Every structure is written in C-alpha cells, then in structure tokens.
Image (spheres, rainbow, N blue to C red):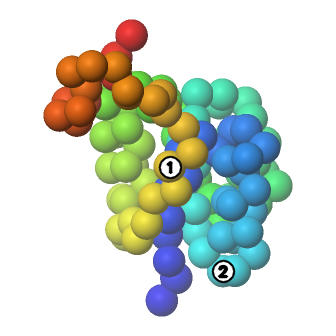
C-alpha cells in the first residue's frame, strides 16, 4: 500500500527536499505552501501521479483544513504530515494551543 504524506512549507528548498525523497521511495505527496507557482513547478518535477499541490497559508486554519480534505480525497487518505511551515507561538498566553492565537 502506498503511503500518502502531506508536506507543509513545500515550496521552499527545505520543504521540497523531503517531498522529493518521499516520492523517490514510492509515496504520493500532498504539497501545501503559499507560493503556488513554486508548488506547480515541484509537482511538474515529481510527476502529477505522484504529487498534488494546494496553495494556502499555514496560519489560516481554513486553508489547512481545505488542503487536507482535498488531498485526502485525491489519495484516498493521508498517512503522515511533515510540518515545515508555520510560526513559533512562544508568546505568553499561547501555551494552551488555541489555533487562533497564531493569526496575525
């Protein structure tokens, strides 16, 4: 059975490298990041049968939710997440993990 991880922050070099590695090992990957043009280029490099891209902003919960739903539908499920994007939430009051605390 093929595994299907989602990679956040995949449009940068550091985020694209593990996606390339996953595809080289027979996985299909979901790519999520803000830069749609770079995501399209990466999908072209990996092959449309191996990757799907959904542009969005990791600080927007609705973008994350929509991306995960689209990827799960395309692949029949997701198996793992490689979180390579986001913001540090080390300000006082964020230790409770409220998703709204990270919004600008």
Is tag 1's residue or tag 2's residue first in the polypeptide sequence?
A: 2
**Who is closer to the viewer here, 52 or 12?**
12
Task: Answer yes or no: is residue 91 visible.
Answer: yes
Specify whether 50 is left or right of 85. Answer: right
Residue lying at 82% horizontally and 55% vertically, measured from the top left: 45
Residue lying at 37% horizontally and 38% vertically, measured from the top left: 64
Q: Which mark is residue 83?
A: 1
Q: Position of residue 61 (x, y in %)?
A: 31, 31
Residue lying at 73% horizontally and 69% vertically, measured from the top left: 21
Q: Which mark is residue 26?
A: 2
Task: Answer yes or no: is residue 40 visible.
Answer: no
Residue lying at 43% horizontally and 54% vertically, measured from the top left: 71
24 lies above or below 99: below
Residue positioned most to the bottom: 1
Q: Which mark is residue 65?
A: none
Q: Quadrant of residue 39?
A: top right
Specify whether 93 is left or right of 33. Answer: left
């Amino acid at each position: 059975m093929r595994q299907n991880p989602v990679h956040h922050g995949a449009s940068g070099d550091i985020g694209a490298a593990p996606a390339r590695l996953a595809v080289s090992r027979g996985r299909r990957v979901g790519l999520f990041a803000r830069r749609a043009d770079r995501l399209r280029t990466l999908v072209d490099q990996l092959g449309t049968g191996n990757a799907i891209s959904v542009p969005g902003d990791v600080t927007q919960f609705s973008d994350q939710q929509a991306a995960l739903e689209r990827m799960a539908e395309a692949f029949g499920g997701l198996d793992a997440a490689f979180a390579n994007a986001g913001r540090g939430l080390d300000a006082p009051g964020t230790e409770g993990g409220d998703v709204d605390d990270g919004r600008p």
